[in-house]
Image (tube, rainbow, N blue to C red):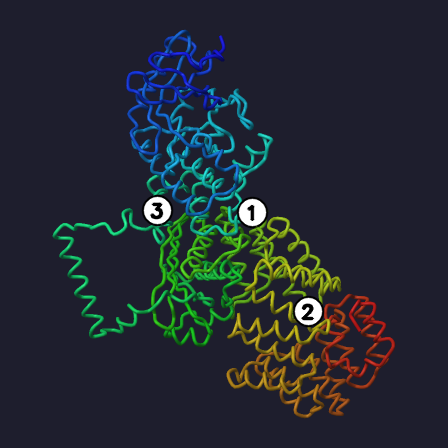
Amino acid sequence: MAVPAHLVGQTLGHYVVLEQIGAGGMGVVYRAHDEQLDRDVALKVLPFGMLADDAARKRFRKEALSLAKLNHPNIATVFEFGRQGGIDFLVTEYIPGVTLDAKLVAGALPEKEVARLGTQLAEGLEAAHQQGVIHRDLKPGNLRITPDGRLKILDFGLAQLMPHASQIGLTVTLTQSQQVTGTLPYMAPEQLRSEPLDFRSDIYAAGAVLYEMATGRRPFEDKLSTILTNNILHKPSPPPGLFNPTLSPRLEDIVLKCLEKEPDNRYQSAKEFAVDLQRLQSPSIAPAVAGARIQLRRPVMMTVIAVLSVLALLFAVNIGGWRERLLRGPTPQIRSLAVLPFENLSRDSDQEYFVDGMTEALITDLSKIGELRVISRTSVMEYKGVRKHLPDIAKELNVEAIVEGSVLRSGERVRITAQLIRATTDEHLWADSYDRDLRDVLAVQSEVARAIAGAIHVTLTPQERLRLRRTRPVNPEAHEAYLKGIFYLHQLGHRDPEKATQYFQRATDIDPVDALAYVGLADTYLFGAVRSDQTFSSREALLKGKAAASKALEIDGTSGGAHVALARIREYLEWDWPGAEAEFTRALEVDPNNADAHRWYSTYLSVIGRHPEAIAEMKRTQELDPLSRVVNVELGWSYLYARQHDRAMEQWRNVLEIEPNYYLIHHSLGLGYLAMGKYHEALPEFEKAITLGGGFDLWNLTPLGRAYALSGNRVKALQILKQINQLYKPRTVPPVAVAMIYSSLGETDRALAFLEKAYEEHSTDLVYLKVDPVYDPLRSEQRFEDLMRRMGLPP
């Protein structure tokens, strides 16, 4: 028997049916008039057959009466359950206004309205949860907004009372055979898995509703239920800021916390949810009654008077500069900071690699924020174990704020404490502690970065928000191997590329989808190929590096480090100049403060002859890594390639004053003297470089042989060439080194022959052919021009 279509004008019990106002999976809803109490009510006629027998009807009545006990201004009140003429009906409070789904037809709501309505929703949920009632089918269609802006939650608990009804008439639902109640786009993952539900399932649904209010769309818009189900179960919700760039980071964090896949990671009560929404509104909420007199209880009043008296005294005598503090305006925005090496609270030196890894990870996350200038790892590690006043450190690094912290690892748990300090005033701007499972360490690092960004009022772009939320649980064993690889790749005094390779490889073996480990592998192969003490180039290493970088990007297309590695491989291995620039550009888009990206992009720009841009990029690198000796030396090289010899020498002499025993400075000064024709001044610089630690390797012997050749000492130059041959036996000497010495000896044909051999071997060092002063004597040769053309270098 179907529900009669002619109920309008009929009477059910003491209710006169006035008009139909809605219909859905749980029945048809009418506005009716209560003849006994002279009020309008909502009368929901249940679908025929929903209650199969009197026993089911009795259970429904019992549950409905328990719902009637819910008494809260944001919950529609249940009055009674009745039956007449074979029709089962439920009577509830009549609420004028529109449903939220009707309101959202016009698009997203203003943030203030989202926060206001969201707070009411959370408060209504909290009241029901306190009574042990879960909604189970929260969605915009079950929320009604009254003309005066009050939100009312409808159909509380009916999804449980009518376990199949919620699937009737929905555009996207699961099949009934799954015995899952609810509306699919708003269902929590545990609900889809038919697991036991608790209040946190409602919080997930509330997050989905807030998402729709804030963006005008659902977290997942898929129409096919199989795809939608998979996305809800496995894919992180896209940050709502992607669809509404005006959304504040605080509201976005609230929404995404509700939408966490695991209930333990969501708000643990609707009260917590409501409190955060209230905090979001607090800066702009006016008193409920403007100008109303507030009467304080005597103890409170006395406390207020005492506080005001103290403040008046501080203001009057200006103790500790309090007058300036009270009169000071809003805290100025901070746009530069440094993360100092975290303290290892375990005092176990074997854990240093782990603690340093946490420091580097936070730097990496903060570096993704374009509005910030974040000092790179190389420079901040200079302060490891150093006791120095923060203002002094800030001045040396040219930053406004410092992040300090500590790490304590115990078994599979890690506790990270961090604080943000304005360096000039020692003012603590933010601090927090995080105690988590080791598997969640990446999420914690991202959370710290977002909290710091919020504390200094940085506006994150939607893409930055997404990158800072794109984390996943780690395999603790794999992550430990990765951190050890980073330690051996970067740590001064401990650098060991072979060990680094082993640890990165172990990390990828354990966790084949660890993009960070693949980036580490790519960097290590590049280090071996381009900076090896034993060979000037290694095609095999570059091919391995390319495979690792490509795999990293396959896993995470937003990995700045992977794009940098691939850019360098495009440059050194493939001589694909446009391809290299595209990768560098993408790296800087996703990771604007990546000092390595700026450094290697600068080198690339020098190689192709765009010198003003190259110098600007190296200066940007210097801003991000001010204490790096290598960066300060390479700025001089940028000047040298641009034939700005005086500026190059000035740069190197400035570094020499600070680092008089750094071998690379003397090596570079020697190159400068050679370029300027001061060959005799060059010789002692190269000899000093060898004495100070450079050693008798190809890197130092080649320019020394050139210096002897150009100063007229042919015998010594040939002796150096013989020494290089002995050094490489039984291997072949890298042909570029031999070509450099023959060019300096004036033996053009031999020099060009060895450059041709280098071309056949695809030597990485040929990339400097266009700009290195060593090749100036050959530039008028047709064969040299032809070689540049074949490499695709611009003329």
Secondary structure beneath label 1: loop
Amino acid type assigned to the residue bearing label 2 in the image: Tyr
- Mark nearer the N terminus (3 vs 2): 3
Residue at 41% x, 37% y: name it.
Answer: 203
- At which x and y percent is residue 96? 39, 30
Q: Nearer the viewer, mark 2 or mark 1?
A: 2
Q: Nearer the viewer, residue 521 or 70?
A: 70
Q: Residues within 10 Å of mark 3 (few under 14, many from 20)?
A: some
Label 2 and label 1: CA atoms lie apart by: 33 Å
549 displayed left or right of 241: right
Q: Residues within 10 Å of mark 1 (few under 14, many from 20)?
A: some
Secondary structure beneath label 2: helix
Please tell me whether residue 544 is drawn above or below residue 58 in the rendered image: below
Figure quadrant of the C terminus: bottom right
Please tell me whether residue 365 is drawn above or below residue 750 in the rendered image: above
Circle 2 residue:
604
Circle 3 residue:
278
Circle 1 residue:
511
Secondary structure beneath label 3: helix
